[in-house]
């Protein structure tokens, strides 16, 4: 095999052209392809900004699975989505069963469910309009926004990814120990 430094200029040109073509076809975004949005705590955009963008993008449906769900800004945005006609549904961890957030969901007419199957329902995702997904480490809480190191990724126009997350949401919803929120707060 030839040493890297002994390649002919013609071979280097062909290799560079091949690598450029490979990158253009397989690695670079194509025209019209949506780019994922990424946010981290204490940066711009923040993880909370990404979650709020996903909620505001919802036009027809929004499925949410959340371990912790107490951020007033996110709760308000979800209720606003419902008011503008978006079909919203939420599954929460059993630690939220008597929390104010589930009470707000019930009062707003949003189908809300509590999972009792798992020790922790540690999911943090949203499926938007059946084609986009927001997910990451970001719990939908003030603490996650202000005190933690968190991340959120919003992938738009990815129906296969959205189907995978929506299927997981539906699977949890169908479990016998997933119950309807009662609506009482703390």
Image (tube, helix red, strand yellow):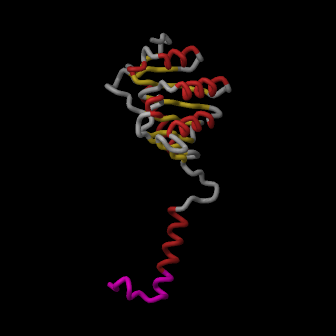
Total labels drawn: 0
Residue sitting at 57 percent across and 41 percent down? 131
Q: Nearer the viewer, residue 113 or 154?
A: 154
Stretch in magenta: 1-14
Q: Quadrant of the N terminus?
A: bottom left
Residue sitting at 44 percent across and 24 percent down? 92
Residue sitting at 63 percent across and 28 percent down? 81
* Quadrant assignment, res 31: bottom right
> With respect to residue 29, does 55 lie above or below?
above
Q: Is residue 95 magenta?
A: no
Q: Nearer the viewer, residue 108 or 100?
A: 100
Q: Main secondary structure of the magenta part?
A: helix
> With respect to residue 135, does 15 lie above or below?
below
Q: Position of residue 54 (x, y in %)?
A: 57, 37
Q: Is residue 13 magenta?
A: yes
Q: Position of residue 69 (x, y in %)?
A: 47, 26
Q: Quadrant of the C terminus?
A: top left
């Amino acid at each position: 095999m030839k040493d890297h430094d002994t390649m002919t200029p013609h071979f280097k040109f062909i290799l560079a052209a091949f690598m450029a073509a490979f990158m253009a076809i397989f690695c670079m975004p194509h025209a019209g392809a949506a780019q994922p949005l990424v946010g981290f705590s204490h940066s711009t955009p923040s993880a909370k900004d990404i979650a709020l963008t996903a909620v505001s993008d919802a036009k027809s449906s929004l499925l949410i699975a959340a371990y912790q769900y107490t951020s007033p800004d996110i709760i308000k945005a979800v209720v606003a989505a419902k008011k503008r006609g978006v079909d919203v549904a939420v599954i929460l961890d059993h630690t939220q069963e008597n929390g104010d957030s589930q009470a707000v969901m019930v009062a707003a007419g949003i189908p809300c469910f509590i999972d009792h199957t798992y020790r922790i329902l540690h999911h943090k995702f949203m499926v938007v309009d059946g084609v986009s997904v927001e997910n990451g480490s970001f719990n939908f809480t003030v603490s996650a926004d202000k005190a933690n190191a968190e991340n959120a990724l919003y992938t738009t126009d990815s129906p296969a990814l959205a189907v995978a997350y929506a299927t997981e949401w539906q699977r949890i919803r169908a479990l016998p120990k997933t119950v309807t929120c009662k609506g009482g707060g703390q």
